Image: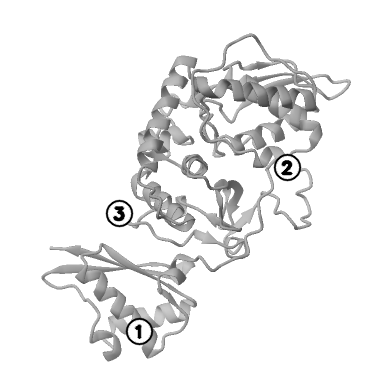
Amino acid sequence: MIIACFLLFAVVQFEESQKSEEGFWRSLASALEGKYHVTNMEYMDVTQMSVSEQAYQKLPNRLKKAYRQLDEYVYKFYDNIDDIVIPKDDFQKVLSYYRADHPQAFWVSSAYRYQYDARTDNLSRATLSFSYPDPETRKEKRISRSKAEKMAREVQEKAELILSGITEEMTDYDKVLYLHDYLASTVAYDDTAPYQHTVYGALVEEKAVCDGYTSAMQYLLLQAGLDSQIAYGYDKADTSQQHVWNVVKIEDEYYHLDITWDLPPEGGTVPVYANFLLTTEQVEKRHKILSPIEGRQEEGKEDSIYPPIADCTDGSLNYYLQNGCYITDLSDDSVANILLKTNIALIEGEEQVQFLFESSYDLNRFLNEVEENVPRVARAFPYSCEQYDTSMITYVEDNILVLQFRYH
């Protein structure tokens, strides 16, 4: 089975100007992979905007035709598949790879039914589920073709509004930061929302869970011209629930990015950056990564249903490093830097300022010095006063300190 928290990808849409090009590529794919044809039904009235072929390129050649066939079924909104001839266990892999490439097809549920030929073990029929989980009845509720088309247009309209905030002067780093901050500060984590797992839930309803955040980020990154992959895994402290997040390419390097775990602290609107542009090594401290990692020989992942992801090795774009808020020790100079940046934030009316400590020991030392009014800290620390209240929020597992201000 495909676990329900996994992201549903791809609200695709075909403009008239793109149909001829789409037909060319489909014809080319057909010539290379073998003839196939699904039905005489028309394609959905949607515009294909955010599609990647990274996962497709990594599929075994024997499954690429099935991927193309699935694509036609999805965008013709036809749920009964009877002409994909592959081993039944491979269909889950094809569907997983397909969704990782298509952050638009929110109407394709993670669930499906199938029948197979017991003599050959090949798939004889699969039934896709164009539905979403109804939070009231806890049952799958079917989405009609016309509703899916309308919702797809709403998604793209909202995406265009968000992307209008990207300027020509922005670097790729700036674009990723902007999209991260927008989603983290705008989309509420809500596991009761009907479209919580989808790009529609995140962008239009502004309510989502991990796969909703991930599919929305993927959708926006692709339209911003940035490569993005999907990582699957789970938190080592809670193995009962699976998790998904993004892997984004900036310049020539890939980085992990997890919006779900960077949501603003309670009472705030500014996200944290604990999971912004991390290395694989940093992510593996807290997560078990289920996706195969390119370049590694990993036992048990040879037949994984998840697309491979890049091994992220560059740590130079860490947010705290970039902003001079990475504390390697608690020297007098480091304390002075913390106090300087904190007071600048106050003067400029900022909501908060954040610091990443290299060690939990130094983080706790600093907190103790604040509480005990140690002179080198007390002389300039912004303790609560008539003008503002200061809250200290710590992310213990990440060694992050957030100083949050509420102005009177």
Q: Quadrant of the N terminus?
A: top right
**Separation of disc 1 and disc 3 at Cα?**
26 Å
**Separation of disc 2 and disc 3 at Cα?**
39 Å
| Residue 299 image-quadrant placement | bottom right
Mark 1 residue type: Val
- The residue lying at 59 percent from left, 31 percent from top is 110
Mark 3 residue type: Thr
Q: Circle 2 sits in a helix, a strand or a loop, which is it?
A: helix
326 displayed left or right of 241? left
Give residue 78's position: percent from left, percent from top. 60, 15
Tag in front: 2 or 1: 2
Q: Which residue is mark 3?
A: 269
4 displayed left or right of 37? left
Q: What's the mark number on residue 401?
A: none
The numbered mark, 1 or 3, whose residue comes first in the sequence reads 3
Q: Quadrant of the C terminus?
A: bottom left
> Is 263 drawn above or below residue 348 in the view shown?
above
Give residue 322's position: percent from left, percent from top. 44, 69
Q: Circle 3 sits in a helix, a strand or a loop, which is it?
A: loop
Q: Circle 1 sits in a helix, a strand or a loop, which is it?
A: helix
> Is 207 drawn above or below residue 336 in the view shown?
above
Q: Toward the viewer: 380 or 239?
A: 380
| Residue 381 image-quadrant placement | bottom left
Neighbour class for label 3 at 10 Å: few (<14), some, many (≥20)?
A: some
Q: What's the mark number on residue 58?
A: 2
- The residue lying at 64 percent from left, 21 percent from top is 23
| Residue 349 image-quadrant placement | bottom left
Q: Which residue is mark 1?
A: 335
The numbered mark, 2 or 1, whose residue comes first in the sequence reads 2
Mark 1 and mark 2 in contact (Cβ < 8 Å)? no
- The residue lying at 23 percent from left, 87 percent from top is 379
